[in-house]
Amino acid sequence: MYQVRLSIDNNKLVSNFQFLGEQVFEQGAIMIGFADPTIELITLGSHGYDVIGKPFTVTLAEDHHIIEMDGRAPWKSWTERLGMPETSKPMELMVLSPLASELPANLHEEYGSPYLVNAILPVTDGSLYATRPIPEGTKLWLTRRNENNILDSVDRMMIQILDSCQGRKPVAVFHADCVARGKVLFNRIMKDEIISRLQYPLCKDENIPWLGMYGGSELTPLGGRNEIQAYTTSLYVIVRKSKIKQEKVSLKTEMVESSRLFDSTRIGNISLKNRFICSATWLGKANHDGTCSPGLISSLLPIARSETGLLISEMAHVSANAQCAPFQMGVYDDSLLPGLKRLADFVHKAGSPAVMQLVHGGLFSIPLMYTGQEPLGPSVMVTPDGPVGREMTKEEILETVGAFKEAAVRAQKAGFDGVQIHAAHGWLLSQFLSPFFNKRNDEYGGNIENRARIVLEITKSIMEAVGEQFPVLAKINSDDFLDGGFNTDEMLEVSAMLEKSGVNAIELSGGTIAGLLSGNLDVSFSPTGRKDVYYSEAAKRFKEKIKIPLILVGGIRFFETADKLVKEGTADYISLCRPLIREPGLISRWKSGDLRKSECISDSACFQPGMDGKGVHCVHIKNG
C-alpha cells in the first residue's frame, strides 16, 4: 500500500514541488509506504460539492487532454457558462466552480457521492488538461461548494473509517487536505475545523501521531484502485491487523434450523428477519448538543450487520431539558435531523430496520443543556439530602406531550421505521406511572388510570401525527422493585391500556435509575447479581392477558434460553442490550450454530467509560 501527495507552487500552477526532509524536488512526487505485515491501512476521501446545471459532454479528447466540450473549445464553454470572460485567471474558475465527473454506480456508496471533483487546468490553446484520463463521451458538471455538505461528507467518511477500524486504536494517521478547502476559498473552511472533526473520533485523548499537509490533490483508493482526487479531505489510518482467535467449536445447526428464533415476522409494517432485537440504551457517544456523531453511528453498524432483526437506537431526549446522561442523542430540534437521517441511512444499509426510542429524563434529567431550571417530574422527590426537582404544571405536561409528538415526527422524517416510547427505568413517564414518584392529586395522579394518562396522551398524539403505517412501540417496567412503586399488577393494567390505544408491541423490563444511583444495581435496570431472565414471571402473566407482541429483555445470555422463551410462548421477541455491547456479532454467531453462551458477564462496567466521556463499551475487550 502506498500514498502519493501532489503539491503545487502556491497556486501559480506552473510547477509542483515535493519536500522530503530538507530536500526539495521540483516536478516530483513522494510515495509513503510500509511493509510491516502486522499493520493495515484504512483510507477514504470526501468532498461535499454539489453539481449544478446541465453537464457538458466531452466530444474530443486524447488521454488527459480535453480538446472539445459540446463541440467547442472547452475553456470558452466553461467561462461562458459561468458568465466570466475568457481572460479570467484559471484559479478563479477552479475555485468558483470546478468540474466533476460521475463515478461508476458501484463506487457511489463507498465514496459518499456519485461525483468525483477533478483537477482540470486550462492550456494556452483553450483546451483543458485533466489530472486523470477523460475519455470522449464523459459528462462534466459544474460544481458549487456547499459548506454543510463538506462537513457532512467528512462525518460520513469518519463513520466508514471508524466502522473499518472495528474499535482498534490507530498507530498513526496521515491527513491530506486539498488547499482549496481553506485559504484559497476565502477562509470559509479552515483546516483546523476539519481536523477537529477528524481527530476527536479517532484519537479522543490518546496521543496518536497525526501527520498531514495541504496540497493540490490526493491519490486515494476507490474500489481497490488509486484514484486521483481534488478538493477533498482524505485520511490514511494505520491500525494493527486484528488477531483472529481460532477455536474448534461444535456447531449445532440442527437446533438453529428447528428454532422459531429465526422466523421472519412483522411488527406493524416493519419486516424482521428474526426474533432478535437490539434493545436501546445510552451509549454516551453523541456530540455535546445531542447531534449524532460518527462514533455513535459507527458503533451501531456491527450490530445492524450481524443478523439483528430490529435495532432500537440509543434513547433520544425529546426536549432540551430532558437529557438523561452526558453525550446522549437528542431529537428535540430540527437542527438534529441531518445526523438522525445519517444514522437511519447507515443502519438500513447495514441490513437492519431502525426504531428510535424517545425519552424524557424527568427528575433525573441533567442540567447540561439548560440553566436556571430545576428538573421536572410528576412531583417533587423527597430524599435524605433534600427535595429534588419541581412538580410539572399541567401546561408543562401538555408541552411534554407535544415534545414527544414532534420528536416522533422528526424520527419519521429522518427515515426511521418506527418509534418506541420509553416509559420504564425511572425516567419521566415511568415516574408518572409509579406511585413511588407520583404524589399528585389531580387527573395525572392517584389511581393507575390517572398515572397512565400522560403515557396514553403521548401515544395518541404520536399516532395521530405519524399515521397508521408508522409503528409505535412502548417500553415499560414489569416492576420498579421499589417499596410503594409500580408493580406487575399495574403493569398488566397499563399494558392493556396501551394495547387498546393501538401500540404495536411492548418491551418489558424492570428497575429504575433510582436503584442505580443508590448503588443497589440489582433493583436498577442493569442488575449484576440477578439470575438469568430477570422478568420471565411477569412476561408469563403478560402473555396470559395481552395479545400484542411482547419483547422481553434482561438476563438472556444463552441461545437455548431464548429459544425456550419463544417456544413456550413466554415472549414473542428476545431483546438484548449488554450482550451486544460486548459481542456485536452474537446473533450471527448463534445463527451459524455456535451456541456458546454470550461473552457478556453482566457486570455493567461498560457504562463507566460513558460517564468518563469515552463512550459505552465493554472494558474487557482490549483493542490495539
Image (tube, rainbow, N blue to C red):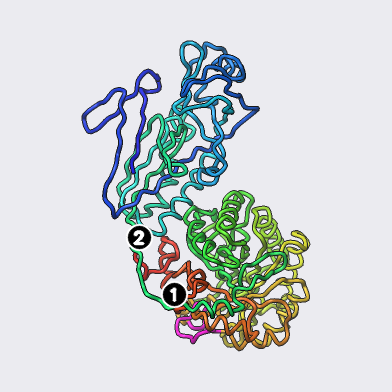
**187 or 584: nearer the viewer:** 584
The secondary structure that dominates the magenta segment is loop
Splitting the image into 4 quarters, where does residue 279 fall?
Answer: bottom right
Whether residue 140 can be seen here:
no
Name the residue that disc number 2 marks: 242
1 or 2: tag closer to the N-terminus: 2
- In terms of secondary structure, where does tag 1 sit? loop
- The residues colored magenta run 522-534
Type of the residue with mark 2: Ser
* Disc number lying in front (1 or 2): 2
The residue drawn where x is 63% and y is 75% is: 507
- Left or right of 362 on screen, residue 227: left
- Image point (63%, 73%), residue name: 263
What residue sits 61% from the left and 57% below the top?
331
Q: Which mark is residue 604?
A: 1
- Residue 525: in magenta span: yes
**Residue furthest out toward the left:** 22
Indicate left or right for 248 with 272 as reference. Answer: left
Query: Is 358 in the magenta?
Result: no
**The residue under label 1 is which amino acid type?**
Ser
Q: Position of residue 615 (x, y in %)?
A: 44, 62
Few, some or many residues within 10 Å of mark 2 (<14, 14–19, 20+): some
